[in-house]
Image (tube, rainbow, N blue to C red):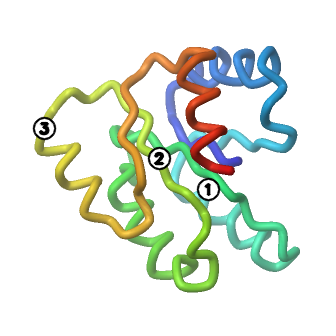
Amino acid sequence: MLLLDDDELSNLLIGSIIEDVRAIKNYKIENNGWNALEYLKECDLKNNFPDLMLVDLKMPEMDGFDFIERYEAAYWKKYPKTKVMILTSSRLEKDKEKAMVFKSVCRFIYKPLTEEKLMEIVEMAD
């Protein structure tokens, strides 16, 4: 799993929830889209691509929309089973509508992430 979010506090909380639930064995947290794309490039080369990505929308440098657009252009056809879920604090309907247009996005989840939400995510990703 890849978590892409620039909020360090949120990342610590989500990392703690993942560790507590123990439902996800391998995960990587990146705090910007450029680093996440580099990570995906490494995963592709190692043939060990994540099966799930949680992506925040509101980030500096490269927002979640730009990241997903670049992800789909580079990897979507090769890894169509990878599930992309938006994990955001944005309550704007236009953000949800825009996100759900992407082929790879299968779910829009509002922060904060809870253990219950994480278990639903894991079940959906299987």
Q: What residue is rendered at 75% in x and 43% in y?
A: 28
Q: Is residue 60 above or below residue 49?
A: above
Looking at this view, name the residue that lies furthest to the left. 94
If you read the primary sequence from the N terminus, does the residue marked by circle 3 or circle 2 appear first?
2
Gap in angstroms between the C-alphas marked 3 and 1: 26 Å
6 relative to 50, above or below: above
- The mark lying in front, picked from 1 and 2, is 2
Rounded to the nearest angstrom, the CA distance separating label 1 from label 2 is 15 Å
Q: Provide residue 67's location: percent of width, then percent of height.
A: 44, 60
Q: Residues within 10 Å of mark 2 (few under 14, many from 20)?
A: many
Q: Earlier in the sequence, mark 3 or mark 1?
A: 1
Residue 85 bears which disc, if any?
2
Disc 3: which residue: 93
The residue tagged with tag 3: helix, strand or loop? Answer: helix
Residue visible at 57% across and 31% down in the picture: 120
Circle 3/circle 1 CB separation < 8 Å: no
In terms of image quadrants, where is residue 91?
Answer: top left
Q: Nearer the viewer, mark 3 or mark 1?
A: 3
Amino acid at dot 2? Met
In this rendering, is residue 37 above or below 9? below
Residue contact at pointers 3 and 2, CB within 8 angstroms: no
Is 116 on the left-hand or right-hand side of 102? right
Q: Residue at x 53, y 23 (%)?
A: 117
Q: Is residue 118 left or right of residue 73?
A: right
Residue under label 1, please give it: 36
